[in-house]
Image: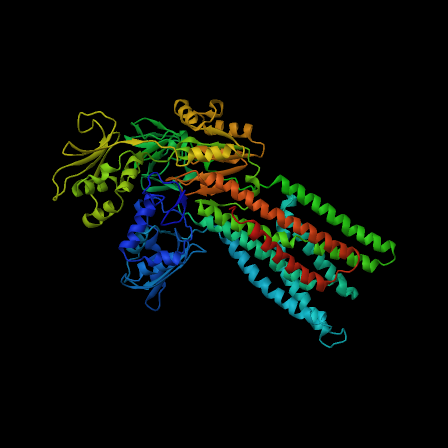
Amino acid sequence: MATCEHCGTAFTPSRPEEVYCCRGCEFVAEMIRDSGFDRFYDLKQGLATAPVRSRPFEQHDFSWLAPLVAESEARSTDGSASLDCAIEGISCVGCVWLIDKLFDPFPGAIRSAAHPASGRLHLDWQVGQCDLESFLRELTRFGYVAGPVRRDAPDHERRRLAARLGLCGAFALNAMAFSLPVYLGMPASFEFAGLFRLIAFISATLSMLVGGTYFVERAWRALTLRTLHIDLPIALGLLLAYAGSIVGWALGLEGLMYFDFVATFVFLMLGGRFLQTAAVDRNRRRLLRSSPIPPSLRSGSETIALESLQSGQTFELDPGQATPVAATVTHEAEVSLEWINGEADPVLVHPGTRLPAGAILLSRQPLTLTAAEPWAESLLARLARRDDTERGSPLLQKVLRAYLIVVLLFGIGGLIGWILLGEPATGLQAMISVFVVSCPCALGVAIPLADELAATRAERHGAFIRTASLWSRLRQVKHVVFDKTGTLTLERPVLQDPATMSDLSDEAALALARLTAGSLHPVGRTLHEALGMRGQRLLAAHGSGNLEDHPGQGVALRPTSDDPGTWTLGRAGWTDAIQDGATVLAHQGRRIAAFHFRDSIRPDAHQALDALRNRPCDLHILSGDTPAKVAPLAAELGIPSNQAIGGLDPDQKAARVRAIDHLDTLYLGDGANDSLAFDAAHVTGTPVVDRSLLEAKSDFYTLGSGLAFLPELFRIADQRARGVRHAFIFALIYNSAAVALCLHGHMNPLLAAILMPLSSIFSVLLVTFRNRPAA
């Protein structure tokens, strides 16, 4: 296992001299060196970041930029304008420095401020003096892609939590500051004693209103769904401690007044939850990729909202978009059906052909279609529907149920016991203190920390976590189900002889770069990336060309004044008589180079699957590809033939998963035809490919090319569980001792205020130590 010299992701090299995990990382590293920005790696300090992949080679749409720039400049009153945008690829202080260095030389540039934590980029410039689109296109060459800030950005909860956390921190300091004199012996007769107690009460009340309601609402929502959530004991402890403090204040019982405890507890719990949410939101914001499903369609001069599309309406589909409904084609074009049936090879369609929903247009020109069904009845509408139901852990449900029963029994038992001894006030104090000290404060901080440490380790292996509940569910997995195309195999064909590329003359390399620039065809994209820096430099020096699509054959570069000949790239036999299955680059009909490709299993697939078998896990393949293609792959990977099924449609895939799953199935897929199976599985993951849909509904996604991350995820889950288990054992011992003190009437607010942060600190240290990678 090697580590990528640019992004730091672990990968298995295919050649001994290979030091980068993907072409994108290799290209960006060369750009950084050539530009004299080597300090980027000093600032990065070995931090693992997401692989660059295809970002520098893709065509990016910046049509959203001009209206925002015009609006900002129109509002300007001092000659400067500003813009906030989302940015993909930013991860560390090195990225912040690099983006600033790239922006500074642009005429009219004032300041750039990139924020890795929020995935935002702020730009200031002189009105009318700065070409922002050129700057953003330059950023893509270094692996950063800017986009508009989404209104449904997934960091809203994190921002709300940050606001609650800041306010509750101030309230906690207030409550502690005005409770401390009481602990230091301030007499009740002191003239400001009542005021101090009132301020502590107000601080605790504000903490409950601002922060406590967060846990109460979530606990109540879980109860209405007839499930138990970790927020339930937190909410119960807060409510009882607050109510008991009010009763104690009213009755003059110092032993019941936990106002400072309430405020501090709310702050600590919000801190733990913020840590947990920030890690998940960071990975949800990492990708700016839009779905190939268009939100609206053109029909002549009109724009049709997707939801309004009806059978019989004619609409235009742009290159790279998926047809949202089954539709009839009006002219020849090349499409990909991989999203729907798993078939990787492009398909030539003729006028009158009925395309299924989800077919993606590969041709460079728009395609006119006639809808054969409304959007509401489309298969793609079902596949794109998101299931936001939070998947919980059955084990956690059992533990919480037992925990609540035990706490209630001890608390009520303590009250009854002291009443029988003739001391009801002490009994009330004992019951309230049991409920207070039994709040899972230590676990409320330790578990989010364990999640953050685990997510950070997963990122080093190229996997990015989207749901905090993944780790406990992952350890229950006994069946791992793979899609075939794009999941077990790479999403694009692999060039068999890379030396063919280096043998091209500059003239031929320029023609090939022009022929493949902006291509949606998988072969074209592979060739464009294989040209790497050489191709980008030639395009920058000489510009792109005028292309002409020949569906089913290839693409031609029209003659120019510099080169009156015609260059073509297409299938063998199109421009010559040789039928050898190659993709041929030709000039004036003369073969210049022949490129041969092969489908490739993802790197580390054999080792990764062997590691999964050793857990042990049963392995399955469910594919829309033909059984004839699935069977050889299953045999090569050692998967039994009765567990490798091909020719399945989306409903059949989902039915197979439901038959296998007993809350113990992980499904790994990448296409729209995997969406229903995703909904049926207990744990879900997806490799992010060129046309993404599933990362928005998956538990995790991966940006690497291999499968080595998969057994690593299981190991990380085991190590996280070890840390949490030790923290739980400590919490059990701590709570047992604390409850014993409570039942004997020896617990008081001062002791509780001391024990709570100490137990949290010890739990954090325990989780950090136990969650270290095994040697």
Query: Does residue 607 sit above or below 158 in this rendering?
Result: above
Residue at the far front in the pictured view: 775
Taking 605 as reference, is 590 left or right? left
Label total for image:
0
Q: Name the one closer to the observer, 120 or 725.
A: 725
Query: Does residue 601 sit above or below 5 in this rendering?
Result: above
Q: Residue at x 54, y 43 (%)?
A: 717
Which of the colour schemes (rainbow, by chain, secondary structure, one colour) is used?
A: rainbow
Would you identify the image quadrant in which residue 401 lies? top right
Can see residue 378?
no
Q: Name the one closer to the observer, 261 or 94.
A: 94
What x and y, as percent, mark residue 403? 70, 46
Can see residue 296?
yes
Taking 699 as reference, is 705 left or right? left
Q: Residue at x 36, y 32 (%)?
A: 600
What x and y, as percent, mark residue 68? 36, 56
Query: Does residue 139 sit above or below 53 in this rendering?
Result: below
What x and y, as percent, mark residue 66? 32, 54
Q: Quadrant of the N terminus?
A: top left
Taking 623 as reference, is 539 left or right? left
What x and y, as percent, mark residue 601? 38, 33
